[in-house]
Image (cartoon, helix red, strand yellow):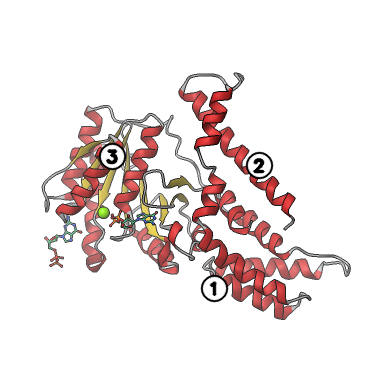
């Protein structure tokens, strides 16, 4: 892709991110959009904060190299576009974790496009593929935190090690920075260390914290977290859960019991059930999504550890093959390393 184009996409994305943030700041300070930003404000935002596009470019580099690297090598050694080339493109896409369904759709579209191609036409295959993915991608609803029932209960579920506790810390930080009052409930009561790890996140983010002793009933913790959230006028209550896979039936029963107890307190609760998946496991993340979605009323997916893996293409597979939207992505271990999933920016980044 010519350099000028790349630069313009980057500038555009920076601008979009900046404008979104700018609107947020105006909202927080109760200013109207017609008031011009001060020079200081613009400097503050542009100097201090890495844009979403730059952050994704930095953290998704392995995925980017994997997806586009393979495509590039196919495209560079084939001058003519024919069935053989299409086979190679299919192979490249298939092995970059974007999923069977997405790959098949792209190849179908490419085949049609190539048939219609004029003899003197130059096709930018990489761009065509990117556009196809952007066209088929599902855009998730954002959680509109200015318009929620209080306390808004977010239950966080998933297999151990996927990043539930860390994600709760990041979510707490995210909502706190939006000016929300946040309470965290430690319903993973299986290990003392799990409770301590979560407590550290509560302290780090200045969130309220509800815990019981190790080994106590997780549903009882959820109950108390709800009650405390209500009594203390909390906006958001984040509930951590255990996720030991070797007793899957117990785990599912435990999650159902938590949900049942919350529903008795408020039929709308839990308002969200976020399933945390580890992107480094590739296609396994997709099959976990399918397993969990059957039983526990999952409303959204958080895909973690995209920073350390070449298998981030699975984000696109999950977006395509699940009815449940990917709502957040994890890009590191720090509290700032969580982003609302923006599929378009995600795909643009990978193909840039
Ligand atoms: P849980 O068992 O599901 O609660 O998982 P934890 O929150 O304890 O996370 C397991 C490990 O994954 C920890 O070492 C975390 O620091 C790490 N982790 C979680 N999210 C991310 C992420 O987005 N990126 C990276 N690189 N590591 C992460
Ligand atoms: P193991 O011997 O370490 O495999 O543990 P078990 O599966 O026999 O469980 C021991 C006890 O802990 C039982 O009473 C289970 O109901 C309970 N338990 C097992 N897994 C979990 C979990 O993930 N969370 C909570 N809170 N309790 C669990
Ligand atoms: Mg945990």
Are the residues at dot 2 and dot 1 in contact (C-beta closer than 8 Å)?
A: no
Cα–Cα span, label 2 and label 1: 31 Å
Q: Is residue 47 left or right of residue 189?
A: right
Give the foreground label among 3 and 1. 3
Which class describes the residues within 10 Å of circle 3: few (<14), some (14-19), or many (20+)?
few
Question: Which residue is found at the position 47% from the left and 52% from the top?
Answer: 325
- Which residue is the site of mark 2? 12
Residue 277: x percent and y percent? 38, 58
Cα separation between marks 3 and 1: 40 Å
Left or right placement of residue 85 versus residue 287 in this view: right
Check disc 1: other Cα within 10 Å, few if <14, some if 14-19, many if 20+: some
Disc 1 secondary structure class:
loop
The image position of residue 171, as x and y in percent, is: 36, 42
Q: Give percent across and percent down for residue 200.
A: 23, 44
* Disc 3/disc 2 C-alpha distance (Å): 34 Å
According to the picture, the residue beneath numbered tag 3 turns out to be 204
- Residue 95 sits in quarter: bottom right
Determine whether the residue tagged by mark 2 lies in a helix, strand or loop: helix
Q: Contact (CB < 8 A) between labels 3 and 2?
A: no
Q: Which mark is residue 95?
A: 1
């Amino acid at each position: 892709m010519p350099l000028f184009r790349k630069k313009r996409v980057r500038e555009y994305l920076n601008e979009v991110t900046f404008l979104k943030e700018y609107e947020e700041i105006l909202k927080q300070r109760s200013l109207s959009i017609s008031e011009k930003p001060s020079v200081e404000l613009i400097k503050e935002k542009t100097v201090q904060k890495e844009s979403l596009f730059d952050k994704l470019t930095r953290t998704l580099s392995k995925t980017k190299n994997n997806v586009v690297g393979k495509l590039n090598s196919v495209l560079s050694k084939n001058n003519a576009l024919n069935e053989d080339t299409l086979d190679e493109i299919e192979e490249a896409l298939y092995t970059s974790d974007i999923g069977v369904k997405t790959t098949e759709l792209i190849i179908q579209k490419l085949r049609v496009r190539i048939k219609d191609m004029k003899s003197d036409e130059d096709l930018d295959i990489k761009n065509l593929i990117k556009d196809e993915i952007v066209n088929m991608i599902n855009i998730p609803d954002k959680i509109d935190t200015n318009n929620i029932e209080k306390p808004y209960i977010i239950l966080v579920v998933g297999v151990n090690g996927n990043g539930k506790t860390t994600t709760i810390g990041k979510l707490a930080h995210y909502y706190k920075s939006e000016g929300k009052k946040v309470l965290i409930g430690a319903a993973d009561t299986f290990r003392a260390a799990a409770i301590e790890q979560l407590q550290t996140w509560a302290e780090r983010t200045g969130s309220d914290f509800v815990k019981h002793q190790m080994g106590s009933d997780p549903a009882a913790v959820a109950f108390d977290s709800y009650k405390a959230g209500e009594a203390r006028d909390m906006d958001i209550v984040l509930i951590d859960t255990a996720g030991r896979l070797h007793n899957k039936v117990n785990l599912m029963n435990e999650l159902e019991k938590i949900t049942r107890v919350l529903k008795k307190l408020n039929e709308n609760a839990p308002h969200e059930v976020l399933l945390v998946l580890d992107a480094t496991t590739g296609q396994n993340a997709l099959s976990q999504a399918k397993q969990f979605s059957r039983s526990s009323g999952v409303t959204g997916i958080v895909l973690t550890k995209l920073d350390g893996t070449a298998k981030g293409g699975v984000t696109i597979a999950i977006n395509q093959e699940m009815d449940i939207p990917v709502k957040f992505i994890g890009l590191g271990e720090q509290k700032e390393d969580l982003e609302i999933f923006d599929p378009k920016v995600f795909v643009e980044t990978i193909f840039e």
